Image (tube, rainbow, N blue to C red):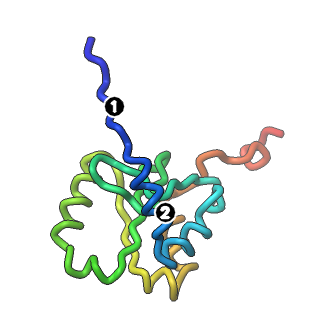
Amino acid sequence: MRRPEYRTRDINRSRELRREASLAERLLWSALSSGKLSGHRFTRQYQIGPYFCDLVCRSAKLVIEIDGYSHDIRQSYDARRDSFLRNQGYRVLRFSNDDVMQNLEGVVATIALALGPSPSPSRKREGSY
């Protein structure tokens, strides 16, 4: 029986990326952290394979990317990256810094639609008290 392979995660790089987060990333994190979006939990700067993702909801296999101006010149890189993530079973939503800064409510609503229903519905709503 073959043992599963575990990759070492680059925790230091994740921490560095969290410290260097853009204002848009911090703003969206504030709106999504601590299960604020229907109980869905997000992780910042989560590593999937060789890539670090801005925000990830692992239970829903959803990656949220907030793109600054540098992504305008890295479109082929982003396409390869998105393809890799899709092959790992993740869906990817991309928003620009401007989208987040100017329309946070709309961005959060789009993410909520992509997530679907809450992962842990309340007992009261399910009819058992």
Image quadrant in which you'd find residue 52 = bottom left
Residue at figure coordinates x 16%, y 69% from the top left: 76
Residue 22 image offset from top left, x and y in percent = 47, 76
Q: How many marks?
A: 2
What's the amino acid at mark 2?
A: Arg
State the image coordinates of residue 94 (x, y, percent, origin top left).
37, 71
Residue at 26% across / 16% down in the picture? 2
Tell me which corner region of the image, top left, top right, bottom left or bottom right, holds residue 7: top left
Bin the neighbour count of mark 1 within 10 Å (Cα to Cα): few under 14, some 14-19, many 20 and up. few
Left or right: 30 as drawn, with respect to 103: right
Residue 81, image x, y percentages: 24, 59
In this rendering, the answer to whether 122 lies above or below 34 is above
The type of residue carrying mark 1 is Tyr
Are the residues flagged by discs 2 and 1 in contact, CB closer than 8 Å? no
Numbered label attached to residue 109: none
- Quadrant where the N terminus sits is top left
- Which residue is at the far top? 1
Q: Secondary structure at mark 1?
A: loop
- Please tell me which residue lies in front, 5 or 20: 20
The CA span between labels 2 and 1 is 23 Å
Image quarter hosting the C terminus: top right
The residue pinned by badge 1 equals: 6
Going from the N terminus, do you reach mark 2 or mark 1 first? 1
Q: Where residue 18 is drawn, which disc sits there?
A: 2
Drawn side of residue 6 relative to residue 26, left or right: left
Query: Residue at coordinates 50% horizontally, 65% vertically from top-left?
Result: 19
Whether 66 is drawn above or below 13: the answer is below
Residue 64 appears at what percent x and percent y?
A: 42, 64
- In the rendered view, does 60 fall on the left or right side of 94? right
| Residue closer to the observer: 106 or 22 | 22
Which of discs 2 and 1 lies nearer the camera? The answer is 2
Q: Quadrant of residue 93?
A: bottom left
